[in-house]
Amino acid sequence: MRWHTGRRSSNIEDRRRIRIPRKAAGGGIGIIVIALVAMYFGVDPTIFLNQQGPTSTSVSSYTTAKPISPAENQLADFVSVVLADTEDTWHVLFNKMGKVYREPYLVLFSGAVESACGYAQSAMGPFYCPGDQKVYIDLSFYQDLKRRHGAPGDFAQAYVIAHEIGHHVQTLLGISEKVHSARRRASQVESNKLSVMQELQADCFAGVWAHHADRSRQILEAGDIEEALNAASAIGDDRLQRRSRGYVTPDSFTHGSSRQRVRWFTQGFESGDIMDCNTFRADNR
């Protein structure tokens, strides 16, 4: 991916030098344990995270983290460039729709973090919190993406950010609130299906970003799209469930199968039109 000459975003909130001790999390520890167990069984962990509001931990109870390596700082620089590129792309697309794109912040953290959606540990992976409209990521996730999931490459890393920004787009367009409302009234199985459709749409939006970013700024190099597709496939619910427990339960999917995730990213990339990302239509399920 051609990124070194790209614009850097000013919407980076760097919390990597502070660590939240376990005792400071209060009731959050119980929530995160439940969420991790839920993730193991294929249940959307944000259901539990969203039940936990911001904690009352004071800044004075935070501890300083270890020094940050040059390699990690370079990765943070890369994240800043990708975030800036998503900003440039979505500003243009929202303007065409007669809407205004509000840029989200991206929070870099190490180990654990507090958000408007509650306390979370890096084991949860990157996430978007609609409560404060921020994306949260521990850069160590990219090592997991490479080593545990077999999805290396800078564009695979960019895809992860673009997917979370896709959730921000859903929030701005009012999609997230509609899904949240429908899930509250639905059975667990139907709630999971709505979660899958929401996640697949974020994959499609990530593809839309890649389409326009490459057209406007020629960011893609040979093999980049394959990296993104590999990452999408590697974190499909079916592959993760099979790896963790040896069998697959489709009714418990919350993010979509590997095939679905690849399909919707590809659709967004090939089309470049968010109107082609309606994963909620009955014939798309």
Image (cartoon, rainbow, N blue to C red):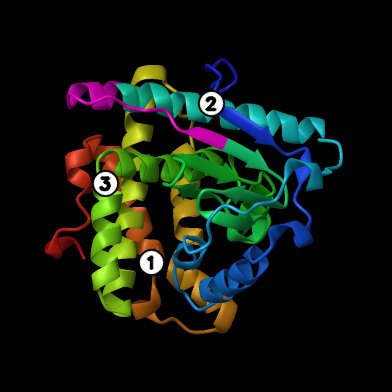
Task: Evaluate if marks 3 and 1 touch, with contact meaning CB atoms under 8 Å apart.
Answer: no
Horizontal relation, residue 28 to residue 6: left or right: right
Q: Are marks 2 and 3 in contact (CB under 8 Å)?
A: no
Element at label 1: loop
x and y percent of residue 163 in the render? 42, 45
Relative to 22, say whether 66 is above or below: above
Q: Nearer the viewer, residue 220 or 69?
A: 69
x, y percentage for residue 182? 23, 64
* Crowd tier of the residue under label 1, counting other residues whose Cα lies within 10 Å: few below 14, some 14–19, many 20 or above: many
Q: Amino acid at mark 1?
A: Ser
The range drawn in magenta is 92-106
Of the residues under marks 2 and 3, which one precedes in the sequence? 2
* Viewer-nearest residue: 7 or 111: 111
Q: Is residue 259 above or below residue 217?
A: below
Q: Residue at x 35, y 25 (%)?
A: 89
282 drawn magenta = no
Q: What residue did someone put label 1 on?
A: 257
Where is residue 132? Give x, y as percent. Answer: 47, 41
Q: Which mark is residue 267?
A: 3
Q: Earlier in the sequence, mark 3 or mark 1?
A: 1
Instruction: Label 2: state its secondary structure.
Output: loop
Res. 213 image quadrant: top left
Question: Which residue is depicted at the point 64% across and 66% down?
Answer: 27
Front disc: 2 or 3: 2
* Neighbour tally class for label 3: few under 14, some 14-19, many 20 plus, Cα within 10 Å: many
Compute the Cα span from label 3 to label 1: 15 Å
Q: Which residue is mark 2?
A: 11
Q: Earlier in the sequence, mark 1 or mark 2?
A: 2
Percent x, y of residue 137? 60, 45
